[in-house]
Amino acid sequence: MGIPEERYSRITAKNQREICLLRGFPCAWGKCAFCDYIEDNGRDREAMEALNQQVLAQVAGDMGALEIINSGSCFELPEATLDGIAALVHNKNIQQLFFEAHWIYRHKLEEMRERMGVPIIFKIGVETFDYDFRQRVLNKHADFREPGEVAEYFDSPCLMVGIQGQTKDMIRYDIDCLKRYFKLGTVNVYNNNTTPIRRDQALVDWFMDEYQWLMEDPAVEVLYEITDFGVG
């Protein structure tokens, strides 16, 4: 995939907030079977910091909430960028942040909360609560067995639906876990990319019909296209 052109947007539907797509160092795991997003990572600290500063300069603060995403975890952003986010939170009177982190960072979340000084909604790419599919097919390197383990640390799981090999029962279980254990969540409808993982269109069609009610659920954001948040 190419390098994203759009890096700032405003989400005006559910959970209204500004959103910035920043650049960070390579994902600490970086081996998920379905992910080809790593081209947006880098190792040139100065270049990343300069770009991130330009993106963050667009934040107005008028929505009171800001989401920061990168192709990995927030802990892989340059230190200067994290300092810039903390300053932005203070200067723009931002009341809530949304960050994303891999399961391997679960013991560092409180440290980031203290650093930013405002409530943080921590997202996690669960993809599915089915252990075997998550670990053996998707290669997520996230070894929790029960959704309650995730809920101990994270606030908002990101699920993925419509993958070949996934079943309707898996998706039913995932949505049930999302609604039972978490106040917020995101469901990503899988789109084919450069990896061997393929989309199951019949399963996608079934999901969009069966779970049409999620479109109206204020706690769940359904992304049919990967650019539905306006960045990428």
Image (cartoon, rainbow, N blue to C red):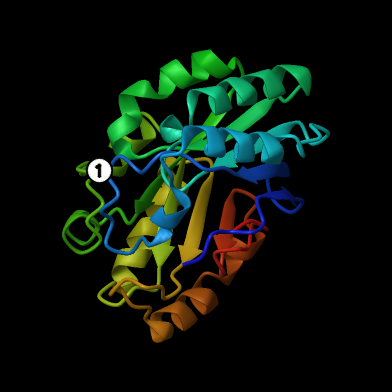
Compared with 178, 204 (above or below) is below
Residue at left 33%, top 59%? Answer: 173
Q: Is residue 62 left or right of residue 67?
A: right
Residue at left 72%, top 42%? Answer: 18
| Residue 76 percent across, percent down from the top left | 41, 34
Residue at left 36%, top 22%? Answer: 108
Residue 81: image quadrant is: top right
Residue 39: image quadrant is: bottom left
Pick whichever, 149 or 91, lies toward us: 91
Q: Is residue 137 left or right of residue 204?
A: left
Residue at left 73%, top 44%? Answer: 16
Compared with 144, 114 (above or below) is above
Residue 19: image quadrant is: top right
Label 1 is placed on what type of residue?
Answer: Glu
Q: Quadrant of the C terminus?
A: bottom right
Q: Is residue 123 left or right of residue 141?
A: right
Q: How many marks?
A: 1
| Residue 95 percent across, percent down from the top left | 70, 24
Pick whichever, 224 or 148, lies toward us: 224
| Residue 141 percent across, percent down from the top left | 22, 47
Pick whichever, 18 or 207, lies toward us: 18
| Residue 128 percent across, percent down from the top left | 32, 57
Mark 1: which secondary structure? loop
To which residue does mark 1 refer? 146
Badge 1, how many Cα within 10 Å: few under 14, some, many 20+? few
Compared with 124, 12 (above or below) is below
User: Is residue 175 in sight in this rendering?
Assistant: no
User: Is residue 232 in sight in this rendering?
Assistant: yes
